[in-house]
Amino acid sequence: MYNKRKDREFVSRLIISVLTEQRNVREAIKLFPETDDKDIECAYHALVHYEADEDIRKKDIEYRDAQDDYLEFIAQTLNSGNNLPKNIIEEYKPYYTGVARRWNNTFEWMIKEFLRFININ
């Protein structure tokens, strides 16, 4: 049985583990639960952007701090069981659908997931 609250708390812990450098982003995103919860999908894509912005984060301290605060806000909101603000959900909606699925051993599946990850459908 699907437990939305439990999944949100788990995702919150994943985000915090990235922010506290206990886990890298790639490890965290592989552990995301399969879900249709838009808040969890949003958190997933925020982490993907976090990793993609690594070069910017190294050069721009203010950007890094703002992005860290943003992820911390997402983590706290999910941990409390609340919904993320609509504007945050809408920010990611046009670009992505779903979260990456658990790794499968077929070559075709890996190619499909890679193309989806880089947003080529």
Image (cartoon, rainbow, N blue to C red):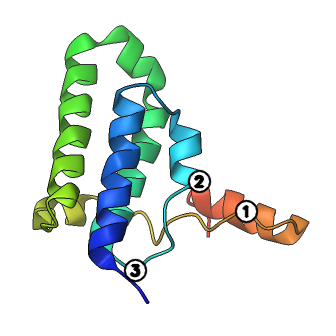
Whether label 1 touches label 3, CB < 8 Å:
no
Q: Which residue is mark 2?
A: 30
Placement of 14 over or under 119, stated as above or below? above
Indicate the amino acid at tag 3: Asp
Placement of 112 over or under 1, stated as above or below? above
Whether label 2 touches label 1, CB < 8 Å:
yes
Q: Does residue 93 show up?
A: no
Give me the C-alpha separation between circle 2 and circle 3: 16 Å
Percent position (x, y) of residue 29? 52, 51
Of labels 1 and 3, earlier in sequence is: 3
Callout 1: helix, strand or loop? loop
Give me the C-alpha separation between circle 2 and circle 1: 8 Å
Q: Which residue is mark 3?
A: 36
Q: Which residue is mark 1?
A: 103
Indicate the amino acid at tag 2: Lys
* Callout 3 crowding tier (Cα within 10 Å): few <14, some 14–19, many ≥20: few
55 left or right, relative to 68: right
Of labels 2 and 1, earlier in sequence is: 2
Of labels 2 and 3, earlier in sequence is: 2
Give me the C-alpha separation between circle 1 and circle 3: 18 Å
Residue drawn at x 55%, y 59% as measured from the top left: 119
Percent position (x, y) of residue 7? 36, 68
The residue closer to the viewer here, 120 or 7, is 7
Q: Quadrant of the N terminus?
A: bottom left
